[in-house]
Amino acid sequence: MKITLRSLNLQGLSDKKKESLLSAIYIGSVFIVFALVYYIHIADNLWEGLIDFFTSLTLATVPTTGISLPAPANPAAHINLYTAAFHFTVGLGFLEIVILLLRVGLLHSSVSRIAETIENIVFWLGTSYLILAYLMNMTLQGEWFIFWAGLILIFGLALIARAFVLLTKR
């Protein structure tokens, strides 16, 4: 049996129902990504690694400031956890790309919904890059704070990407 756009009969659905359907697909897919990452890293004792990570947090001074913030005592000891986080963020980034394709090609979503999805793509794939670039190669506690500064930067870039898409609406 061949499934076509006509056989799905999405044209008969209201925009609100289409968005609800896509939200349900998205939430279910996030749980699938989470389960897959957990399954892939089950041999790494991911749960124990998460507990070890939080119990290893100490107050560390942010370089060139007098501010102390939580950071892992030995950042390099949590590579398995960082790897799982990397896989999760890459999975969510690719999921967002699929959602974008569905929004543009199948559902013809509003520009604001498309902009939101592009924002999410930039955030999740940007975060995965930061995890790969900083956390998985971290040896110094100060690099922990560079990661968080980068995450703030990625969040700003994601908001700017959303704004540019919304500007196309005008």
Image (cartoon, rainbow, N blue to C red):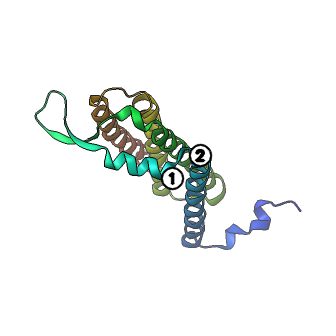
Q: Toward which corner of the image does residue 53 lie, by quadrant?
A: top left
Dot 2 crowding, Cα within 10 Å, few <14, some 14–19, many 20+: few
Kind of residue at badge 2:
Ala
Going by the numbered disc 1, the residue's amino acid type is Ile
Image height of 35 relative to 135, above or below: below
Q: Position of residue 59 (x, y in %)?
A: 20, 42
For this orientation, the residue located farthest to the right is 1
Image-based side of 77 in relation to 21, left or right: left
Residue 170 visible in the snapshot: no
> At numbered mark 2, what does the secondary structure look like: helix, strand or loop?
helix
- Lower sequence index among marks 1 and 2: 2
In the image, what residue occupies the spot 69% across and 68% down?
A: 10
- According to the picture, the residue beneath numbered tag 1 turns out to be 114
Q: Which residue is mark 2?
A: 43
Picture residue at 61% right of the left edge, 63% below the top: 25
Please state which of the two labelled residues, at mark 1 or mark 2, is closer to the viewer.
2
